[in-house]
Amino acid sequence: MAFTVLDALNDHPTAPVEDTFMQSQSSKSWVKDFLPIKKLLVHTYLTPDGSSVLANFDAFIPESDDDLLRFGEVAYPPNKRHYKLYSESDGIDWFHSEISNVVLPAFFRYPPITQNRSRALENWHNSGSSAG
């Protein structure tokens, strides 16, 4: 049976993440108006036997008719990998790899949506930098 977008939405990211608790040296002026997140509101929980993680989507808006079409689209779970979050861009990479890219197939047809690369990544590629 194919892995669908609905399966992806009901699946919890499985890649281990090491949070380094490093603080960004961001120079964005609006950041200073917000305190760091101390209490995280999570919409997932473990089953009593600890064998599964369940998601509670009650906080979200009701599903529309096109959501039902999207849920059946074929998706691919992310590859197994480890993350160490040192910077904002590490968090962005984690989100794209584990969350948005996994459900992006839902928006290929109903309606089509294009995901653009971030400006920082674009600048890095244009500078001639390489990963190796």
Image: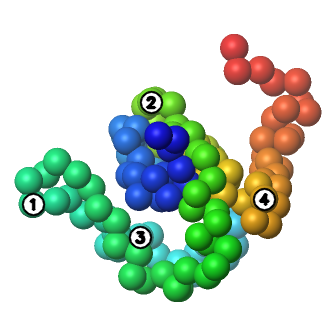
Do we see residue 4 in this rendering?
yes
- Which residue carries the number 4 mark? 109
**Amino acid at the residue labelled 1:** Pro
* Residue 132 position (above or below residue 8): above
Residue density around tag 2, few if under 14, some if 14–19, many if 20 or more, within 10 Å: few
Q: Nearer the viewer, mark 4 or mark 3?
A: 4
Name the residue beneath numbered marker 2. Answer: 80
Q: Where's residue 43, x and y in %?
A: 35, 70
Residue 48: numbered disc: 1
Amino acid marked by disc 2: Lys
Determine the residue located farthest toward the right in the rendered image. 126
Q: How are the residues colored?
A: rainbow
Between residues 25 and 63, which one lies in front from this camera angle? 63
Residue at the image point whose x is 50% and y is 58% from the top: 6
**Distance in Å between CA atoms under marks 4 and 2:** 27 Å
Task: Give yes or no for contact between labels 1 and 2 (Cβ–Cβ under 8 Å).
Answer: no
Residue at figure coordinates x 89%, y 30% from the top left: 127
Q: Amino acid at mark 3?
A: Ile
The residue drawn where x is 70% and y is 66% is: 28
Foreground residue among 88 and 8:
8
Residue 86 appears anywhere in the view: no
Tag 4 or tag 1, which sits nearer the N-term?
1
The picture places residue 121, in percent across and down from the top left corner, at 78, 41
Tag 1 near tag 4, CB within 8 Å:
no
Give the Cα separation between the discs numbered 4 and 3.
Answer: 36 Å
- Labelled pair 3, 1 in contact (Cβ < 8 Å): no
Residue 60 image offset from top left, x and y in percent: 48, 81
Measure the alpha-carbon separation of dots 1 and 4. 38 Å
- Element class at badge 1: loop
User: Could you tell which of marks 3 and 1 lies nearer the N-terminus?
Assistant: 3
